[in-house]
Image: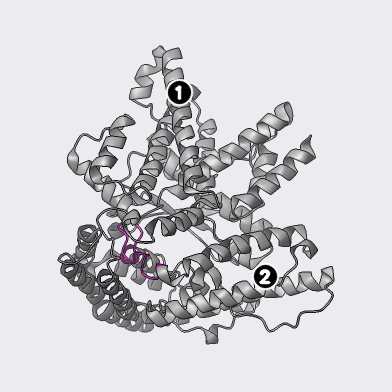
Amino acid sequence: MKQFKRCSALLLGALAALSLVACSKKDATGEQERFDQFIQQEFVDTMESDYPSMHIFLIHPEDFGVDPSAVEVGLGLRVDEQTIEKTAQDVAAAREEFQTFDRKLLTEEQQDTYDIYQFQVDLDSKLCDPKFDYYQQAFGSTMGMHTQIPTLLSDWQLRSEQDVKDLIAVVGDVKPYVDSLLDYTRKQEEKGLLMTDLDSVIQYCQGVVAAGENSAVLHSMNESIDALDLDKEDAGRYKAELKEAFENSFLPAYEEIITTMESLKSGDNNQEGLAHFEYGKEYYTLLLQQNVGSNKSVEEIRQMMEDACNRYDKGIETIILENPDLYESFVNFPATGFGSYTAILDNIQGKMYRDYPEVSNLGYNIVNINEEIANSGVAAYFNIPPIDDTGDKQLRVNPDIGGVDDIYTYSVVAHEGYPGHMYQNAYAYENLDSPYRKALANSPAYSEGFAVYAQYSAFQYLDGIDPRVLDAYRQQELYTYCAIVLSDIGIHYDGWSLQEFQDFLTEMGLELGDEALYESQYKQLQSTPCAFQPYYVGYEEFMALRRKAEKELGDSFNQKAFHEAILKSGAAPFCVVERNVDKYINASK
């Protein structure tokens, strides 16, 4: 299970220090070998400390030095004071060991890994400061644990009979795991650090409980058991055990969430932003940097998004004024002409290799999102495959997002599929050697920013729609989302009220009309800080790198080579990505 604490096992591993004796005189080969051992141990420790991580990322753990018998089957460490304290100690120990390496003696690829690890561990060390222990909210309205658990279980891959037994144990662990989250949440309220959209959480959980044993989550898990073609009697027994665990653990956990959230309504719950907590602005700054993949300040990010808003505003105005004959198309966007999600992906795949480096394993299947998850407003997502999996990749799409021939649907499928996450993931698995880099390097701004970049890049493969119309659509969307990022900063760093948020959107020309819509959008941002930053700050970073490359290279700029430069970085902070782009620029002059 993706751990609750930002400096948790999933992100950084158990982080046990290696007992290595430092040499008085370091040599390059020895230092490189020692560094590889350190990073490999980080990977092993992570996998062995968190069963869901091992199951999701590895089909054959033994091939990576991971001992499955050392892994406790369940959802992961409980969220309590002991775990929080130990995690902070482990992070400090790992950082101390990491600081013994001489970066200059490492290979270029190792230096990338070094910088990725350093960015993560430095931020997590700061976030592990005890003054932030109760700042992270367990039940964010869109990305809280109550929404993550059904997604995790619905997508759980069963590869063997033992996996079925383990899944039953995981489902049985839902209630104890959720209880620890609720204990943490009650302590937050006692400390005056609760900041949760209680009604949103209650509404979601009521839908889960109402489904009962007819739950789409349980149905999905049963389908996975059927797909194994086990002995009929064995399969029936496992399904009965799974149902029992579901009824005795999963459903009671969601009933308890509802009860707890109802009880918290009479307590202290911050219904505005992080800025209203004692260390809220400091915490938000760290959270922002973690989600934008750089050490830029809040003011630097604010300026970046304001500049982007101005650029898109002028761009839209120019396109419309210069092309009044296209006004109808701007207002009523023409259909793309595609009749299925597969048709969209196949069309893109047939054209994208003129602009993106080829990868060999791009087989896929598309599955509708689980009904209960679809109700949460999720448009689509890509299921990250194990790093040793050579089978088809899976894309989940919400059938209710709109018509298949709608431009929004095209964008969503391109974002999650080609040339977005599915392609990005396939490239990394095929071209990066380090298991740590493939599975644990964590830069949401790189991953999501690239996927946004890719979805708009895919507009060039749409035939029959005027490029000027597509460009206006792109800039209008980006203008809106840049304003949302600025609103997030306003709420959590400046302490905006609902009225100030509404006034800002009105000033930006983004009136929502209905008061309830303003409140709904405000609550979404207020309860899930930095949710949009990885997507749109990440996008702006990639576009800034592209503009830089185009300016310096002129006619020598090659889109395919540029894409290769950013893809070879893997999920890295932008200091690494920029270095690889600079290498491409210098080599192309």
Label 1 packing within 10 angstroms: few (<14), some (14-19), many (20+): few
Is 290 contained in the magenta span?
no
In the drawing, does residue 135 fall left or right of residue 344?
A: left
Is the Cβ of the residue at disc 2 closer than 8 Å to that at disc 1? Answer: no
In the displayed structure, 236 sits above or below 148; it is: below
Disc number for residue 99: 2
Label 2 packing within 10 angstroms: few (<14), some (14-19), many (20+): few
Identify the magenta region. Answer: 132-147
Q: Which residue lies furthest to the bottom in this view?
A: 69
Q: In which quarter of the image is residue 105?
A: bottom right
Amino acid under disc 2: Gln
Q: Is mark 1 on a helix, strand or loop?
A: helix
Q: In which quarter of the image is residue 585?
A: top right
**Image coordinates for residue 155, horizontal then vertical, percent:** 41, 65
**Image coordinates for residue 470, horizontal then vertical, percent:** 46, 28
Is 145 contained in the magenta span?
yes
In the displayed structure, 545 sits above or below 220; it is: above
The alpha-carbon separation of the residues under discs 2 and 1 comes to: 47 Å
Disc number for residue 314: 1
